Image (spheres, grey):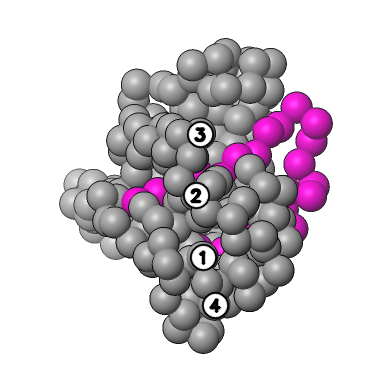
Amino acid sequence: MSNPFDPSRRQFHRFLLAGLAATALPARATAPEWLPITPPQFGDSPGKIEVLEFFSWGCSHCRDFNPLIHRWTQTLPKDVVFKQVPVSFGRAAWGNLARLFYALEGMGELQRLDAAVFAAIHDRRTNLYTEDAVLAWVRQQGVDGRRFSDAFKSFSTETRVARADQLSRAYKVDSVPLLTIAGRYRVVGRPGQGQPGLLAVADELIARARREGTKLGRR
């Protein structure tokens, strides 16, 4: 007859109970750091890894992210191309901000006034959501009003705004800021790391795209 107080028997029971407890507990879900983009999208930069930031000057989170993303872009390898895509989500006000973006870009004024637009909207509560209000503001910034008005209403600007809206739909953008990598990966980020965590994941996805050769061609 076996001895119920045998140490080896007690140890076996402990292992058995531990195994049963482990199988009874639900598996802890791990939050994804990125999601696949389905279907994958082709970029406009053949031979390059394209990084897109979907954003709006009207978004306070985009305003907080703006200095981080611009510092980050200064460190990107030569095989990476970074582009911003202003979104409207069908809002007329944000659509005018997209027109402002492309008008300033076409005039070579975007880099100078990018942070100033965020500051005007979010710090000074300046209305930049109508054509008249935008025109008055850019004149105060030393921009030629006639040239800007022509650029704001130009066919080129309207075409680029329509293209930005098309991209937003293709990438299924439902919130901003949003980073996408190589037309295949949507950056979610890491719990508890905030916006810097988005950039850490983006770095890893750029390396992944390079390893997998996901430098997608022209749309």
Residue linked to disc 4: 120
Side (left or right) of 213 relative to 159 = right
Label located before the other in sequence (1 or 2):
1
Q: Position of residue 3 (x, y in %)?
A: 26, 55
CA–CA distance in space, label 3 to label 4: 26 Å
Magenta segment, which residues?
A: 62-88
Disc assigned to residue 156: 3
Residue linked to disc 1: 135
Contact between marks 2 and 4 (CB within 8 A): the answer is no
Amino acid on which disc 3 is placed: Ser
* Residue depth check, mark 3 versus mark 4: number of the one nearer the observer: 3
Q: Position of residue 117 (x, y in %)?
A: 57, 68
CA–CA distance in space, label 1 to label 4: 14 Å
Residue linked to disc 2: 152
Callout 3: SS: helix
Label located before the other in sequence (3 or 1):
1
